[in-house]
Image (cartoon, rainbow, N blue to C red):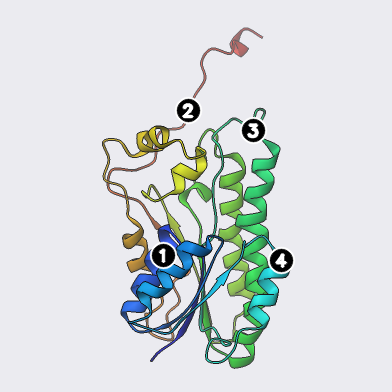
Amino acid sequence: MKKTVLITGASSGFGKACAERFALAGHRLILLARRADRLHDLAAALGAQCDVTVIAADITDAHAVETAITHLRAPFDQPDILINNAGLALGLSPADEADMADWETMIATNVTALVRMTRLILPGMVQRDRGHIINIGSTAGHWPYPGGNVYGASKAFVQMFSRELRADLLGKKIKVSNIDPGMAETEFSLVRFNQAQEKADKVYEGTKPLSAQDIAEIVFWVCNTPAHVNINSLEVMPVCQAWGPLKVDRSMGFADE
């Protein structure tokens, strides 16, 4: 059955890979991203496989996004699947040195925009009594690391928001899934380090990280489980990544107090 899939952050990374995977199956696509040139190039590339419409807007621009969503015309006006993918990390400084503007941008993108998009799409799903919301989180929402501060906190919010949605939607035929990728090689680190390619490359040096296509395949599978099956949460890491031991600082001198 052909479905209408709305993907945010669709011009690169996980979003672009998801668009390509769902297009391969012939689903109808609504692609939202800030970079209009990339978005239109992607739509042109996928147009032979499926019906595509684009929304060129910054996900944090509430007026632009709401206007675009409310003016979607048939057959794009009833999304069956919402993939809340748009998100970013900025910087890796400790909390006392971090740029407040970076923190505010991460919250606006990873939290506020995701909540707003969900609120725009969810009433229609409830009215039709069908739908699936996929929220792209991160292992950073489970496992803290130095410099993760607001990014990790924003992804912990995404995980709990997903769970709260499931609680609210009990009794309705609407699925909610939270996907938490670990180390994945996309533009993520380039954005985090302000386009410093060498610094971004160091993150993946000597590893075999996840790819955007790996995550797209997982998202596609989650969206194609039987109607009575809901994948609540799925955490995925490459084999080269795991959890480290708890850190202990032995230099602070409290033992002498």
Q: Residue at x 64, y 57 (%)?
A: 111
Whole-number angstrom distance, CA of label 4 to CA of label 1: 22 Å
Sequence-first disc among 2 and 4: 4
Q: Which mark is residue 247?
A: 2
Q: Which residue is denoted by mark 4 in the rendering?
A: 62
Specify the amino acid type for callout 4: Ala
Q: Nearer the viewer, residue 1 or 241?
A: 1
- Left or right: 66 with respect to 225? right
Specify the amino acid type for callout 1: Lys
Residue 221 seen anywhere in this rendered image of the structure: no
Q: Are marks 2 and 3 in contact (CB under 8 Å)?
A: no
How many residues crowd around disc 2 within 10 Å: few (fewer than 14), some, or many (20 or more)?
A: few
Sequence-first disc among 3 and 4: 4
Say which element carries label 1.
helix
Q: Which of pointers 2 and 4 indicates the residue nearer the eye?
A: 4
Q: Which of pointers 2 and 1 indicates the residue nearer the eye?
A: 1
Specify the amino acid type for callout 2: Lys
Q: Are marks 1 and 3 in contact (CB under 8 Å)?
A: no
Specify the amino acid type for callout 3: Ala
Q: Which residue is denoted by mark 3 in the rendering?
A: 98
x, y (%) of residue 169?
61, 80
